[in-house]
Image: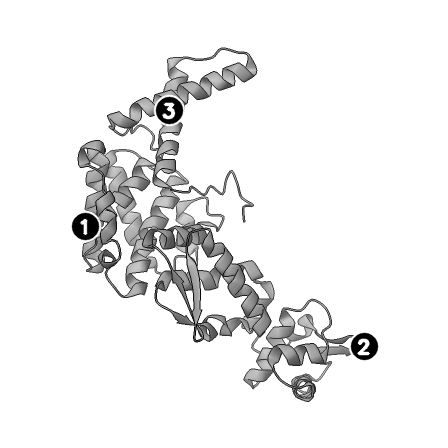
Amino acid sequence: MSTKRERSLIYLLVNKKDFVTAKQLADELHSSDKTIYRLISQINSQYDERPLIISERGRGYKLDYQQYLDSNQQNVDLRRLATISPVERRNKIMKQLLLVAPRRVQAETLFEEYFLSVSSQISDEKSIAKILQRYSLKLVKNSGYLSVIGSELNIRDAIQSLINDTGIVDLNQILHDDNFPRKYDVRFVFEQIRYIETNIESSIPYPYNLNLFSHMYILLDRVRNTKMAVDKTNDHALDEYPKVSSLDARLLGVSEQVIKNTEDYISVKLPKIEGYYLYQYLVSSRIDGFVPNTVAEHSKVQVVTNDLISAVESLTNKHFHNSDLVNRLSEHIRPMLNRLDNHINMANSIINPNRN
C-alpha cells in the first residue's frame, strides 16, 4: 500500500467483522462510491495470487486477513490493530490525554494510528467522556482539540486505574510492562521503595507495593508531561494538610525524605503536600510487623474489628473471639479504614483477575 487513503480503507476493514457495502465505506471515509471502487482495485492489483479485499454481490466487501498477514507487505501495524480491542484503544487514548492534562491534544493526532471512521472516533470520545466522569473529570473538545479538565488528584487517580489494570501480580513484572516505558524511572522508584522498607524495617507486600509504585511513577510522569511544576496546581491542598501530631512520625518522615529524593532526581521543587500524599499510601498499606503509632485511629480499628467478629459469631452461632484473632484481624482492618479515609483504591489481580 502506497497511499494514506489505501491504508485508511484497509484499517477501516480491519474493524469490520462482516461484509460492508461500498456506500457504507464511502460514508465513513467521506468519499464517493467510485473512489472506493478505485481504491479497492488499486489495493488488489498489488496481490498476485488472490485479492486482498473479497467482494460478494449483494453483500459488499471484506478483508482477507490471512492473505494480508501472509504477504510480504509491512503488516506490523495491521497485526497490532487486528488484536487491539476497542476498550484497549480507548484506554491508550485516555492515558495520553491524562498524562498531559490539562494541556490539549489535537484529536487527529490521538486517533490517526487507529485509522477509525468519523463515527467510530465520536463513539470513542463519548465512551472516554463517560469513563472520566467516574473520576469527576471532564473531556473537553474545542476546535479539533481534546483535553481533560479536573483536579490533579482525580487525574492521578484515573491514571492509576489505567496502569494498574494490567494483571500485574509481581512488582518485578513492571520491568517488562509497556505501561512503564522509562526504565530509569522504574529503577529510581524501585530504589525508593527499598529505601522505605529499609527505614521501616519491614517489606511492603503485593498489592500495596504496586499501588505505591504506581503513585510514585505517576508523579514523575505528570511532572515530565505537563512541563510545569506540580506545586503550581496543588497549593489549595496545603490547607487540608493535617497536624503532624496526628500522624505516625516514622512513616511521615520517610515519606517526606522520598519526596526530597524525588526532587533531586528530577530537579523540580515539589509541594509539601506530596509528602502527605505518599504518607497516605503507606499508612493505607498492610505492612507486616509495623503498626502505625496513631492513637486516634487505634480505638476506631478496635471497634470495627470487634463488631466484625461479633457479627460473624452471630451468623455462625459460634464463639471464637480471642486476643490473637483481634490482633491479626486488626492488621487488615487498620489499612482498610485508612484507604477509605484517604480515598485510595486497591487493585488486586490475584483476587479479581477479570475486572474491567
- On the image, numbered disc 2 is attached to which residue? 58
Disc 3 to disc 2: CB gap under 8 Å = no
- Give the CA separation, mark 3 to mark 2: 68 Å
Residue 140, image x and y in percent? 43, 65
Q: Mark 2 belongs to which amino acid?
A: Gly
Horizontally, is 212 left or right of 47 in the view? left
**Residue positioned 47% across, 64% down in the render:** 93
Q: Earlier in the sequence, mark 2 or mark 1?
A: 2
Residue 307 in sight in this render: yes
Residue 170, image x and y in percent? 43, 44
- On the image, numbered disc 1 is attached to which residue? 260
Image quarter in which the N terminus is found: bottom right
Near mark 2 (Cα within 10 A), the count class, few <14, some 14-19 or many ≥20, is: few
Q: Mark 3 belongs to which amino acid?
A: Ser
Question: On the image, which quarter does residue 277 sit in?
Answer: top left
Residue 72 in sight in this render: no
Near mark 3 (Cα within 10 A), the count class, few <14, some 14-19 or many ≥20, is: many
- On the image, numbered disc 3 is attached to which residue? 330
In the image, residue 172 sits, relative to residue 138, either above or below, namely above
Residue 64, image x and y in percent? 70, 73
